[in-house]
Amino acid sequence: YKMDEFKGCNLDYFPENILIDVLSYLSVRELVRAGRVCKRWKRLVKDQRLWRTVDLTAWKGVTSRILWFLLRQYLGCGLRCLRLRGLLLSARGGTFLSESWLKALSTKCPRLSKLCLLHADLRSLPNCQILPGSLRVLELRGCELPRSFFNQSLPTSPARIGVETLVLNNVPSFTDQHLQNLASWERLSRLELRDTFRVTANGLRSCAAKEGLSGLEGLSRLKYLEIGITGRQGYQLQMASLGLGAGWLGLEELSLGGKEVGPGLLCASRLKDLKCLHLWACTLSELQIVRSCRMLRGLRQLEFLDVTFQPRQSPPAEEEQEQEGGLRRSLAGLLPSCSLVFTNCSVQVNVD
């Protein structure tokens, strides 16, 4: 008898909180379809708890018309994180994000703090001041930028950029000029540059925080900087990372990755305020590491991730066993207050 009752039950008997938890596992496209089932589901689907984190990168058919529909019907004060895929690599092409839609997004979603754009063509936008002022994290991956995109000194809008973290991944149009424009971002404290091939050593050197006639100049509020080249053009990283040799006041955390890390690591020895150093996906020798860390007395954490250590001049049988231990002992003597982290590291063995 109880089984018959259970079989006769449907979703109408479930509390709304449970239904919202179930609906939270659906994608945006499935949520929109679920809202067409009945009036109750339509009301539940509009609950802002379901629209805190919206990921549209998997929805390949998204157009500006769909964006307007989602903004008018579903997106609201609950939205915290938004991920969008543009039409840069699409056969249709065309403008994806419009200035009017971004302004409406600022008004409709005042709590949006993170925006991630993938393969978006932003060259039709005047500058970054049309982005929501509530943003704290901005990620641009595979995007195209206009020259003045990061310039907030234009008189078109008095609003100041509040972005604290800027991530640029595979943005070939990002140049030294863009980097210099970031100096006017008053809250920028974290900058990640991956596969930004047009950034040069002079660009980094000119933007480094330093004492000027009117106080600190450059990216003076930056605490975290990442430079990485995951593609074939590792030489650009070598040249760009040489700009670290000018020193960078206030920079506390540095991340270097890619094939050509050695020159940048040597220049990092001049970063007097550095507390954390992350090295990833590179090949280094013990001599390079010890030389670079000798001057970093304030270092508190040194992390190696996917690093291949070049062998020392020792017998092959002892080489692999002693490499990490020898480096650990050397660094412990130089930096007694620094914690060392080795993750997925290996030792290059000479066949000869």
Image (tube, rainbow, N blue to C red):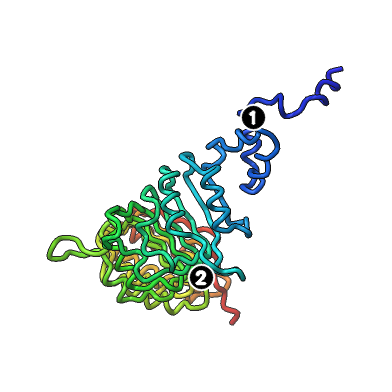
**Badge 2 element:** loop
Q: Hey, what amino acid is under mark 1?
A: Ile
- Give residue 18's mark: 1
Q: Nearer the viewer, residue 12 or 55?
A: 12
Give coordinates of residue 132: x percent, y percent: 39, 51
Q: Residue furthest top?
A: 1
Q: Is residue 21 left or right of residue 323?
A: right
Quadrant the C terminus occupies: bottom right
Q: Are marks 1 and 2 in contact (CB under 8 Å)?
A: no
Task: Decide: is 136 above or below 17.
Answer: below
Q: Is residue 318 left or right of residue 104?
A: right
Residue receiving disc 2: 230
Quadrant the N terminus occupies: top right
Give coordinates of residue 104: x percent, y percent: 44, 49
**Badge 1 element:** helix
Q: Is residue 189 left or right of residue 10?
A: left
Q: Residue furthest left?
A: 213
Kindly report the distance in space between the C-alpha atoms of the residues bearing marks 1 and 2: 44 Å
Q: Hey, what amino acid is under mark 2?
A: Thr
Name the residue: 86% across, 22% down: 4
In primary-sequence order, the first of circles 1 and 2 is 1
Name the residue: 69% across, 26% down: 14
Q: Nearer the viewer, residue 331 or 80?
A: 80
Name the residue: 33% across, 51% down: 162
Q: Nearer the viewer, residue 151 or 217?
A: 151
Say which quarter of the image contains residue 277: bottom left
